[in-house]
Image (cartoon, rainbow, N blue to C red):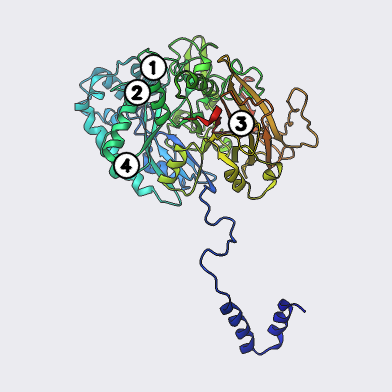
Amino acid sequence: MSFGKKLVIAAFTAPLTVWISVFSASAADVEIEKGEIKYSPFAEKDYPQNVYFGDTHHHTANSGDAFMNGNRLNPAQAYRLARGEEVVSSSGVPIKLSRPLDFLVISDHAEGLGVMYEVYNGNPTFMKDETLVRWNKAMKAGGKEAADATNEVVAAQGAGTLPKPITDPKTAGPVMKSVWETYTQTAEEFNNPGKFTAMIGYEWTSVPGGNNLHRNILYRGNKSNADKMMPYNSWASEDPEKLWDWMEKYENKTGGRVLAIPHNGNLSNGRMFEPNKFDGSPIDKDYAERRARWERLQEVMQTKGNSETHPTLSPNDEFANYGIAGWEYGNLTMQDNPESPEMRPYMYLRGGLQQGLSWEKKLGANPFKFGFIGGTDVHNSLTSIEEDNFFGKHVIQEPRPNRWEHVSKQGFGKTRYTWHYSAAGYAAVWARENTRESLWDAMHRKETYATSGSRMTVRFFGGWNYRAEDAENRYLAEAGYAKGVPMGGDLTTPTNGANAPSFLVAAMKDPLGGNLDRIQIIKGWLDTDGKTHEKIYNVTWGNADKRKLGSDGKIPLVGDTVNVAQATWTNTIGDPELSGVWTDPDFDPFQKSFYYARVIEIPTPRWTAYDQKRFGIKMSDDVKMKHQERAWSSPIWYTPNGEFN
């Protein structure tokens, strides 16, 4: 009989004092040094084990265009909704999220921060200007008059013709300083480390000629540092290099840290990744190094569409035609040149990554070495972007029967409607804890991914010796970090005689969303002649027993269970989890390259289908009623000889 069996028998036959002494003696005989026994697979790990979902691009009534469009909700109300409370929208509709956010960055426009409140209130300093008097009346009238006035503000900002009283530091400065310090105080009050993070930020809104060059500035620290310098605004300069100068001065003065996230490359008319500086001179190494330092991430998805790629830029990508309807007409104001195929390599993010490889070869530094992140750009203080709970971007786009046909912009004989807007997107951050510092650090190292509005979980690693069994391991992340680098990283020199990199990728569905259709890896590279290329590889997919990879590298469509009339679908196709290891079959060790994962869900109803069902209306046939939600990981880069920057 074993010792264990003898002990069990003793427990039932011996007196209680004997039973206690047996266990006491056994425990006393074992001397264990702290840390000697390793048992918990989650203890003492120095890599992030949690993904946090939030929004890095959010506007409240402190943003002039938001206020003019009817937003009356302040940062405190925005935080309350984000952390799970019920609030009432500016249009009087109660709203609550299905799940709280983990973090929120309120990024109100630095330009005229809070000033429109004072214009609306009839501040005598501002009422001396005829244009501001007219805007005051338009805001109070609301509806179309307010919307027209807002469009006028955006156009005037792009043309540099805003009324002087709201741009002059002497008249507008005191208002903006007071609003900023009140906002940072509110962020302190709602910041709850470990539970909900209120990260301080703002938007620098450069829009030359209507072309979107906006950046969101995110602070690592707290109010005490953020208040030492007022946010830099584009009224001082629309040149990104001037913004970087301000960021450097801020860090030197305060000891704090900041980073910038450019957004809406799809509305830049080819200026986001143009080959010249803002002043027209060619990009040089100093510019490349400074941009790579300050702009670690790019926004790939938000309410104003998808900036990943375009069918004319990626003709072999069967999923390229996503989130671009209505947004390919032209820039923000639709008053400049219409968008053309020649612009697209310099405005969509995949093109930007490819441009970066070319610049790195020429200059020895890559200006466009960015990770991916999502945001919403809501202007109604409501980060509510699930398809069945979408409250639009502006107050005028909040739930009502005819919101889908509201005209947003017109130009070039084209019209943008509210139905062109997407319920998107999330910033997903792999961090060690839910704090300002940890989230910011993860963003800085680009360990982030974006989603179109789903909360799917995505892991992506690159290395030289992943094996198929690593993808089946419950502790997949441990193998991922031990053998390679996570999303946002650089591949080191090949190890163990490997002749091609391997990638470990895994995804799990949003508990409230659709099953997964497939995981793809998108590769971009620079050949020896200096030409850029791209290719899409299907790595793993749902219903693999029925769908086989063809000789062309493609797989059959997953199917479609969407009932548009009822705004429902079933998870009878696809898989809830997918994982795999993929080795690049076309690897050339002498070619610079990047890789990122794209995870695609099965078809599900779009917010327009929910509106059509709930309001009992019929939209026009051109309105999209369903889509396939997706996620994009930050890239992993390979540089020959490991000489990466």
Residue 16 picture location, percent across and down: 63, 88
SS for dot 4: helix
Question: What amino acid is found at the position of numbered circle 2 in the picture?
Answer: Glu
Q: Are marks 1 and 4 in contact (CB under 8 Å)?
A: no
The residue sitting at 49% across, 11% down in the picture is 338
Vertical placement of residue 151 versus 231, above or below: above
Q: Earlier in the sequence, mark 3 or mark 4?
A: 4
Which quadrant holds the N terminus?
Answer: bottom right
Residue contact at pointers 1 and 2, CB within 8 angstroms: yes
Mark 1 vs mark 2: which is more N-terminal?
2
Q: To which quarter of the image does residue 388 belong?
A: top right
Q: Which residue is mark 1?
A: 277
Mark 1, Cα crowd under 10 Å, few <14 / some 14-19 / many 20+, is: some
Mark toward the start of the polypeptide (4 vs 2)? 4
Q: Which of 143/460 is in front?
A: 460
Report the Cα–Cα distance between label 4 and label 2.
26 Å
Q: Locate residue 134, reporting x and y percent.
A: 29, 20
Label 2: which residue? 241
Q: Which numbered disc, 1 or 3, marks the residue closer to the eye?
A: 1
* Secondary structure type for disc 3: loop
Question: Pointer 3: what residue?
Answer: 606
In the rendered image, residue 212, in percent from the top left (x then y), is placed at 43, 21
- Cα distance, mark 2 to mark 3? 39 Å
Q: Determine which residue is flagged by label 4.
A: 184
Q: How many numbered discs sit on the rendered protein?
A: 4
**Could you give the CA–CA distance between mark 3 and mark 4, rounded to whole angstroms?**
36 Å
**Quick one: label 3, few (<14), some, or many (20+) residues within 10 Å?**
many
Q: Residues within 10 Å of mark 4 (few under 14, many from 20)?
A: many
Residue 408 in view, yes or no: no
Q: Amino acid at mark 4?
A: Thr
Q: Position of residue 635 (x, y in %)?
A: 55, 31
The reply, left or right, for residue 180 in relation to residue 297 is left
